[in-house]
Image (tube, grey):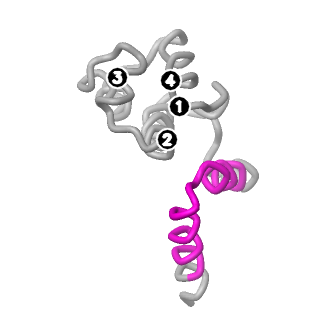
Amino acid sequence: MRISSLGPAIRRYRKVAGLTQAELGEKTGFDPKTISRFETGAYTPSVEALFLFADALDVQLKAFFADMGDEDEQRAYLFNIIHKATPKDLGKLIVAVDQALSKP
């Protein structure tokens, strides 16, 4: 895992949790601009910050270091999204998957 992958991972799990940068900032004590800088890679979060993010986003710390090019990691990520989805969002996910798989 490259450090440059850390910011996109934070962003990905923030979005899965349905939080804005401001909401994640409220939960972790960081300014939304700092959250943005972490997500874009302008700042590298400390280990302590990563623990705060993992707790606020309800993920294991290792999730930030997953290799999203790895098929098993991709499956785990998708399973996590499906597992946390609301009934309404499950319907949207099914439609999206059907559309993605029906394209040649």
Residue 44 on image: x %, y %: 41, 20
Instruction: Find residue 17 and name its label.
Output: 2
The amino acid type found where label 2 is placed reads Ala
Q: CA distance from mark 4 to mark 2?
A: 11 Å
- Check the image and report above or below for 65 versus 46: below
Q: Which amino acid type corresponds to the residue marked 3 in the rendered image?
A: Gly
Q: Amino acid at mark 1?
A: Leu
Residue drawn at (57%, 22%), measured in percent from left and top?
55
In the picture as drawn, the residue positioned furthest to the front comes out as 87
- On residue 25, which mark appears? 3
Location of residue 97 with respect to 5 vertically, above or below = below
Residue tagged 4: 53
**Crowdedness of circle 4 by 10 Å Cα count: few (<14), some, many (20+)?**
many
Q: For residue 35, which quarter of the picture?
A: top left
Which residue range is magenta in the image?
75-98
Q: Which residue is the extreme one toward the right?
A: 72
Image-based side of 31 in relation to 76, left or right: left
> Would residue 19 be found to the left or right of residue 59 on screen?
left
- Picture residue at 30% right of the left edge, 27% below the top: 37
Which secondary structure lies at badge 1? helix
Could you tell which of marks 4 and 3 lies nearer the N-terminus? Answer: 3
**Residue wearing tag 1:** 57
Q: Is residue 51 rendered magenta in the image? A: no
Query: SS class of the residue under badge 3?
Result: helix
